[in-house]
Image (cartoon, helix red, strand yellow):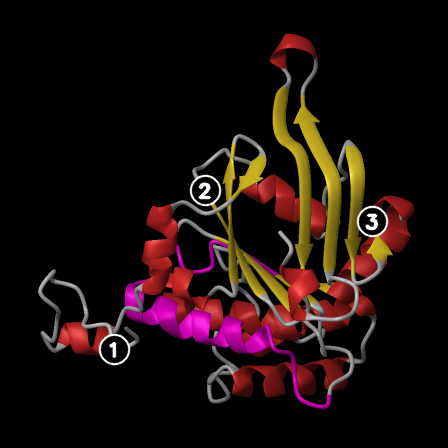
Amino acid sequence: MTAAQTQTGGPPAIRLRNITKSFGKGRAAVHALRGIDMDVASNQLVMLVGPSGCGKTTLVSIISGVLDADTGTAEVFGVNWPDLSGAAKTKRRGELVGFVFQQFNLIPMLSVVENVAMPLLVRGEPMDRALDRAAAELNGVGLGDRVTARPAELSGGMQQRVAIARALVGRPRLLICDEPTANLDGHTGQHVMDLIKTASRGKAGDEKTDGRCVVVVTHDARIFHYADHIEEMEDGKLKSPSKVILEEARHVPHYDREANGETNGNGGATDKTK
């Protein structure tokens, strides 16, 4: 991917060179990644698409510093993960990276605001300050009136918005989203992606989030149009997106109109972007 070189004059937010990763040894070895080179520019939302088992989750685990590559260089905003180890890597990852998961991973016995505050509390932030920042982040995703609710009292879409607020409360420069809409209906998924797309731009006047980028792993063709760039993976390698994926990315679903029966001749929502 060369998007980083064409979008900004500075270094890419993510820079991967010759990344390889295998699991197991000998004939039983599984080669998950086979020489990945990839640049991602600041303020970009990049989607990784491809079949299950092609290496997408392994790749984002290396990008986020959760997993070590066997070979190669993995730099994120100037931090080369292989140069760090142990507590130093954990601390830097907590400052630099936010995560949004398919299963939400909210703690059921905590209130919504306590869930969102958790990353700040782990860092050692005072309770009052952490809760204030968490409440502000919840307000930003439209849940300012549900701060005392428990996760079980919320719909799936609301829980994912809580998860997004939790990922953003620490003001990370990199946001990793693993199948964020897989468990959501189309309309709710679109709303969640609106929030993630906005997050990719950072906050105006906030130097810490200026230049933020987002990497989304997904099988969900309904959200391809949100991507600034799409990379397809197959057998541990990146390749240019297929014509089918590019065509799906051009279609913008309009769920409100679909619900009202306003469709095009193919049964889909009329696409006014054409």
Q: Amino acid at mark 3?
A: Trp
Pair 1/2: label in front: 1
- Rendered location of residue 22, percent (x, y): 68, 26
Residue in the picture at 30% in, 64% down = 251
**Residue under numbered circle 1:** 272
274, 97: nearer the viewer: 274
Q: Helix, strand, or loop for circle 1? A: loop
Find residue 81 and name its label. 3
Residue that lies at the very extreme toward the front in this rendered image: 6
Q: Amino acid at mark 1?
A: Lys
Q: Is residue 241 something that shows in the picture? A: yes
The mark that comes first in sequence, 3 or 2, is 2
The mark that comes first in sequence, 1 or 2, is 2
- Rendered location of residue 245, percent (x, y): 37, 50
Q: Quadrant of residue 55?
A: top right
31, 44: nearer the viewer: 44
Residue in the picture at 54% in, 62% down = 106
Find residue 251 and name its label. none
Relative height, residue 183 to residue 37 (above, below): below
Q: Amino acid at mark 2?
A: Gly
- Rendered location of residue 241, percent (x, y): 45, 47
Instruction: Specify start and end residues of the magenta stretch as a single range.
Output: 176-205
**Spatial CA span between label 1 and label 2:** 28 Å
**Residue under numbered circle 2:** 50
Q: Helix, strand, or loop for circle 2? A: loop
**Spatial CA span between label 3 and label 2:** 25 Å
